[in-house]
Amino acid sequence: MNRRLFAFAVFSSFMLFGCDNTATVSAPEGEATSEKVTDSNTDPISIGYSDWPGWVAWQIAIDKGWFDEEGVNVEFKWFDYSASLSAFASNQLDAISVTNGDNLVNAASGSEGIIILVNDYSAGNDQIIAKSDISSISDLKGKSIGVEKGLVDHLLLNSALTENGLTEEDVTLVNATTNELPQVFTNETIDAVAIWQPNANQALQNVPSAKALYTSADKPGLIYDTLAVSPASLSAHKEDYAKIIQVWGKVVDYINDPDTREDAVSIMSNKVNVPADQYSTFLNGTKLMSLEENKEIFIKSDELSSIYGSSYHVNEFNIDNKIYDQEIDIDKLIYPDLIPQ
């Protein structure tokens, strides 16, 4: 579920921050694969999707032929997450699966994506994991924490520290890519890591006495996973994107229905080669958003329960952490009109 490795959009492939003990690892590369789900002489809408439950869920619609039923000419292309954002930035994709925070980073680098749908919010799959001698977030004062700086679990860590009266000045951040953090965590100098699934499970396996102190379930709405579309494609294909959104509603219903959930999990787990029983736990840490829930999320407010409020919050975080220098016009990057009312 490496869905958030976007730093290339602002930095080089090595993220260099000013901490003496920062570990740096290059971001992973990946080749895209395609799932063309309709036959047509016209070019399909191309959508990048990656290994995260709220995006792997599209595979259900692909396998079931629901886009054909809606008459939508669409091609889903499977990527390592960072590679999908690079492809979107170079106009190789019409739309991408992206967190709302990463979408802001893309926009700051000149690659605007307009959020038209919220697939889910993280409800426990992003975690701050600590070794056995640390029992609370407050105990992290003076400790070393592995994190991929500038990514959403850096944001989660920042929120946890703030809620417990600490700042990043009270800890030492050790920078490493998320897929390397399970191994970094085994180093005796690292006390905790901020990490997402399935890497979080691997970190817990590597250090069996460790435990999660804080998760995205403690801060619902901090991390939204979305479908973002290029302005040109949105302008040209609004009716098609409205149909794609309708298909998403069908996907969520299929996953949530007890009679079809087993089949849904089987399709998703097969896509990413993870045992179905394990994949069910990942789904439990992902709050999938129905179309009815999307209506509420797209109501403008300053709260994390709104895609606007969450993005305002991340915008401030990115400025404070010098991810980019000027605030992004959030309202310009959110388009609620295609959500059925």
Image: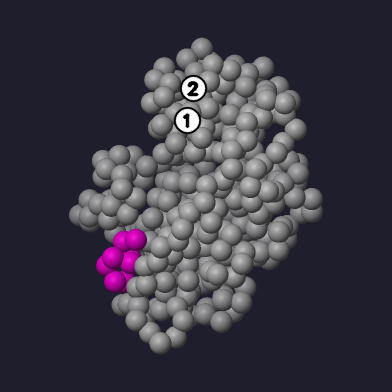
Magenta stretch: dominant secondary structure: helix
Q: Is residue 175 above or below residue 3?
A: above
Q: Residue at x 73, y 41 (%)?
A: 321
Residue 214 relative to residue 315: left or right: left
218 horizontally vs 113: left or right? left
Q: Which residue is mark 1?
A: 182
Q: In the image, residue 5 lies at what x, y percent?
A: 56, 47
What is the quadrant of residue 124 in the picture?
A: top left
> Looking at the picture, which amino acid does disc 2 mark?
Thr
* Display coloring: one colour
x, y percentage for residue 194?
Answer: 55, 32
Residue at the image point whose x is 65% and y is 65% from the top: 112
Q: Badge 1, how many Cα within 10 Å: few under 14, some, many 20+?
A: many
The amino acid beneath tag 1 is Pro
Residue 159 — which label? none
Q: Measuring from the top left, give residue 3's x and y in whole percent.
A: 50, 49
The foreground one among 252 and 277 is 277
Figure label count: 2
What residue span does the magenta drawing correspond to? 59-66
User: In the rendering, at what x and y percent does residue 163 appear?
Assistant: 63, 29
Q: Which residue is mark 2?
A: 186
